[in-house]
Image (cartoon, rainbow, N blue to C red):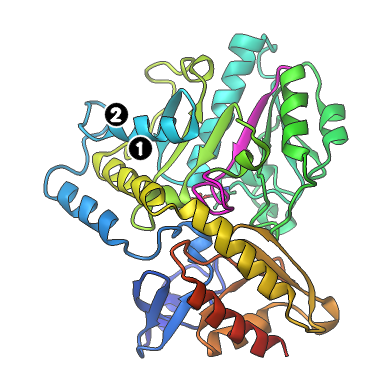
Amino acid sequence: MNHIELAEKYGAHNYHPLPIVISKAEGVWVWDTDNNRFLDMLSSYSALNQGHRHPKIIAAMKEQLDRVTLTSRAFHNDQMGEFMKILCEISQMDKALLMNSGAEAVETAIKAARKWGYKVKGVEADKAEIIVCENNFHGRTTTIVGFSSEEQYRADFGPFTPGFRTIPYGDADALAAAINPNTVGFLFEPIQGEGGILMPPTGFISEARRICSENRVLLMADEIQTGLGRTGKMFACEHENIKPDILIIGKALGGGLYPVSAILASQEVMDLFHPGDHGSTFGGNPLACACGKAALNVLLDEKLPERAAELGEYFISRLRSIDSRHVKEVRGKGLLIGLEIDEASGVARPFCEALSQRGILAKETHQQTIRFAPPLVITREEVDWAVEQIQAVLL
Ligand SMILES: *Cc1c(COP(=O)(O)O)cnc(C)c1O
């Protein structure tokens, strides 16, 4: 059996991958088992902002592998403090709590907001509510899929956790109207990546900030996909000069080498966690912290947010200049770009398959939209090459 047949036979079919078997990678490029080269325009859903196998992150991890990899939080380790210090400095938040996956960080944020609601805001026991948005994607745990508006994410996985209310994405009036005395948080994505690269109206984040502050509700930004340079700022909330109360990050925090996630919050919120309230065996392990520290330093040293801003603007303008009846819209910020295929031309998947024939790996989100989100280390020449291929497929 070949690799695909083995995966089909022995693995759960919870994904529908393109029929490409990747066996090595470097920077923005990956190679399949026949040594065909592809430009990675998905970047593992933005977990590879620093590019595949960045040498500095590899070096930091190798060094750590030779010293100590796991201590559990029953003891201190000599990597965690420094990592959290850098995290707090770049986000201008007070404190961090380290987890592994994005979904775990979102769950951590939900616990933090609820606890703040009971202990600080004075919400009656078990009455806390968190407002979420239509088309959200916050992960796959049972609590999180319970407040998804995507039928397939929920179907047959209930019963679900109560305490969530849904509003249309980007609708500040709906947010204000949904708040009641039991509301403890508003959980949102600055741009909805999995939802199809959906952008809220300009000013929505600052409106949400104002509404949340006025009503003593925590603004909880899920920047797992938009954060760490992807949209042309270190965090997408910075486009509106907003600081959330809880910032949730993951994906590129591990530099594409290791799962690392975190929430960042004010001292008031974070100090509500006491020993035993919450935890994770691998969260904050020294290998993860060495990796995360190097991943952040690469973003800073190589000015990857600035690079995403510049090349993203260029890429979007070049995509918009493609004259094709198949294209309904090109939208995005930085290097998080969606190209929506007109429904009259069918769904996006055949276009993704055609792109892979021309050496570009891109994946559709939500039937109609192709996401272009290359590693932020991509060069202008590589963007030009990609646009040529995209243009050819859209003719
Ligand atoms: C990917 C993602 C998650 C979930 O992260 P996992 O590491 O897959 O659990 C949560 N929120 C957003 C916005 C994401 O893009």
Closer-to-camera residue (49/308): 308
Q: Is residue 312 above or below residue 65?
A: below
**SS assignment for the magenta stretch, majority:** loop
Residue 202 picture location, percent across and down? 77, 45
Is residue 97 rendered magenta in the image? no
The quarter of the picture where the N terminus appears is bottom left
User: x, y percentage for residue 127?
Assistant: 71, 19
Residue 4 x, y percent position in the rendering: 43, 82
Secondary element at image label 1 = loop
Q: For residue 365, which quarter of the picture?
A: bottom right
Q: Which mark is residue 163?
A: none
Q: Is residue 182 visible?
A: no
Residue lying at 70% horizontally and 42% vertically, measured from the top left: 147
Q: Nearer the viewer, residue 307 or 276?
A: 307
* Amino acid, disc 2: Gly
**Residue occupying the point 57% across, 44% down:** 223
C-beta proximity under 8 Å, tags 1 and 2: no
| Residue 362 screen position, x and y as percent | 57, 74
- Residue pointed to by mark 2: 81
Give neighbour class at mark 2: few <14, some 14-19, many 20+ (Cα, 10 Å): some
| Quadrant housing residue 48 | bottom left
The residue to which callout 1 is attached is 283
Q: Is residue 297 above or below residue 30?
A: above
Instruction: Name the front one of labels 1 and 2.
Output: 2
Callout 1: few (<14), some (14-19), or many (20+) C-alpha neighbours within 10 Å? many
Image check: 76 left or right of 272?
left
Ligand 1 closer than 8 Å to label 1 CB: no
Residue segment shown in magenta:
215-234
* Farthest residue, direction left: 66
- In the rendered structure, the answer to whether residue 22 lies left or right of residue 368 reads left
